[in-house]
Amino acid sequence: MTDERSATFRWAADAVDPAHVPQRTLYTGAQMPAIGLGTFGSDHAPAQLVADAVLGAAEVGYRHFDGAAVYANEREIGQALKQVMAGGVPRDELWITSKLWNDKHAEEDVIPACRQSLDDLQLGYLDMYLVHWPFANYHAPGVNVEWRNPHARPYRHEAFMRTWRQMEALVDLGLTRHIGVSNMTIPKLELLLRDARIRPAVHEMELHPHFQQPKLFAYVREHGIEPVGYCPIGSPHRPERDRTPKDTVDTEDPTIVNIAARHGVHPAVVCVMWAVQRGQTPIPFSTTRAHYLANLRAVVEDRLSAEEMAAIAAIDKGCRLIKGQVFLWEGAKGWQDLWDPDGTIPA
Ligand SMILES: NC(=O)c1ccc[n+]([C@@H]2O[C@H](COP(=O)([O-])OP(=O)(O)OC[C@H]3O[C@@H](n4cnc5c(N)ncnc54)[C@H](OP(=O)(O)O)[C@@H]3O)[C@@H](O)[C@H]2O)c1
């Protein structure tokens, strides 16, 4: 336990009023806070530290938390959420996302996987349950990017739809209020939108100033799907194995650095403000109270000018950080195959 948090929920004197946090209206009419706290501690943040951040973030006004079974911290986060609700925050003021991991795509595994996350989180329902990746290609935790699962396969729409039917069943069962996807492409989304009985309400995708994905961003919004932006700061502390020499650093971009100086904030905060104003829902990760508070406060109390927004629009470098190499199948040409770059899905 750090001295920055309490074991029980206490409103912080410097909290941001959650009622002032911008909201996104999903196609169901539900309201989702337009900024959430990411909880992927990756290799550097132990589960309890992330859970402490969830409690601390709730104390300063966060109501949206982005989690996943594979982050291996849902039990600890469940304890934190219990404290938050015991401290007086009603369940329906929280927005909790979890995700189905790649080794649970089989029809018989989807409902038990969701129930396991609910048990761990000590919740009766989720607000959002996402298919984490559109591939049932499992990799062991912490493997390096050269590792390949011999059973890995390219995207198969029939298989994905079998998983999706179970996702729809989760809504019917009341285990989650919404379902969504992550790491999809336009060709894959077109097939899903054609065949879904319950459409995805969000698409969680990598979005930061150096990776703006303008076509996919426009496509999901045109189809009534809310874009949730992961790695909104450019994931500056991601593990070495997820770095390549060509990766660029958003928080060192002179445009971002200059705007940050003008607003008297850290460059990370500018990335978060840009995301909310552009129309995506960023889910910045932080276990540092001053950081997660600054991110939330800026979204409520400060604004980028039209000129600043235009300047950031112009620094897109198409720099994908989470390339997904470990999900590749034998015979794949390279990580680009996961992302259908020429508009077709590799067979
Ligand atoms: N769907 C998917 O496949 C997928 C993939 C990747 C990530 N995600 C989700 O997206 C979330 C965010 O991505 P990410 O964690 O990779 O990266 P990120 O949010 O872009 O960057 C997080 C890093 O930025 C630092 N930071 C945050 N606010 C700051 C501030 N105001 N000033 C200075 N530094 C600041 C944090 O350090 P401190 O802790 O020191 O503040 C943290 O190490 C994840 O946690 C996860 O929930 C989803």
Image (cartoon, grey):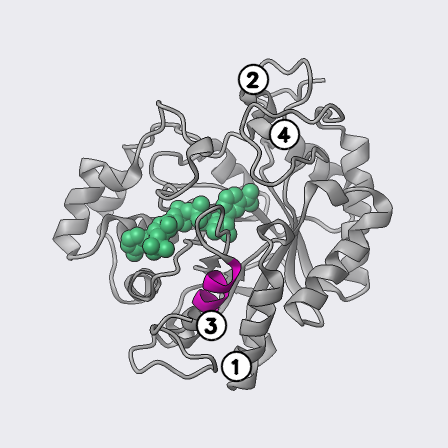
Residue underneath mark 3: 55
Residue occupying image coordinates x 33% and y 32%: 316
Q: Label 3 amino acid? A: Leu
Q: Give the residues drawn in magenta, as a range.
A: 47-54
Residue type highlighted by circle 1: Val
In this view, the residue farthest toward the right is 108
- Numbered circle sitting on residue 327: 4
Local SS, label 1 = loop
Q: Along the line of sight, which residue is nearer the eye, 130 or 73? A: 73
7 above or below 293? below
- For image coordinates 81% across by 61% down, the residue present is 172
Tag 3 secondary structure: helix
**Whole-number angstrom distance, CA of label 2 to CA of label 1:** 46 Å
Callout 3–callout 2 Cβ contact below 8 Å? no
Q: Residue at x 50, y 51 (%)?
A: 40
Q: Looking at the picture, how far across and down is residue 279, in whole percent?
A: 42, 50
**Measured along the vertical axis of the image, is residue 211 above or below residue 84?**
above
Comes first in the chain, label 3 or label 2: 3
**C-alpha gap between disc 3 and disc 2:** 40 Å
The residue that label 2 is drawn on is 334
Answer with mark 4 or mark 3, whichever residue precedes in sequence.
3
Q: Which residue is mark 1?
A: 89
Main secondary structure along the magenta-highlighted residues: helix
Dots 4 and 3: beta carbons under 8 Å? no
Q: Is residue 280 visible?
A: no
Q: Which is nearer the N-term, disc 1 or disc 4? A: 1
Q: Mark 4 is on which residue type? A: Phe
Circle 4 sits in a helix, a strand or a loop, which is it?
helix
Give the alpha-carbon distance from disc 1 to disc 3, as whole Å. 11 Å
Q: Residue at coordinates 51% horizontally, 85% vertically from top-left?
A: 87
Q: Residues within 10 Å of mark 4 (few under 14, many from 20)?
A: many
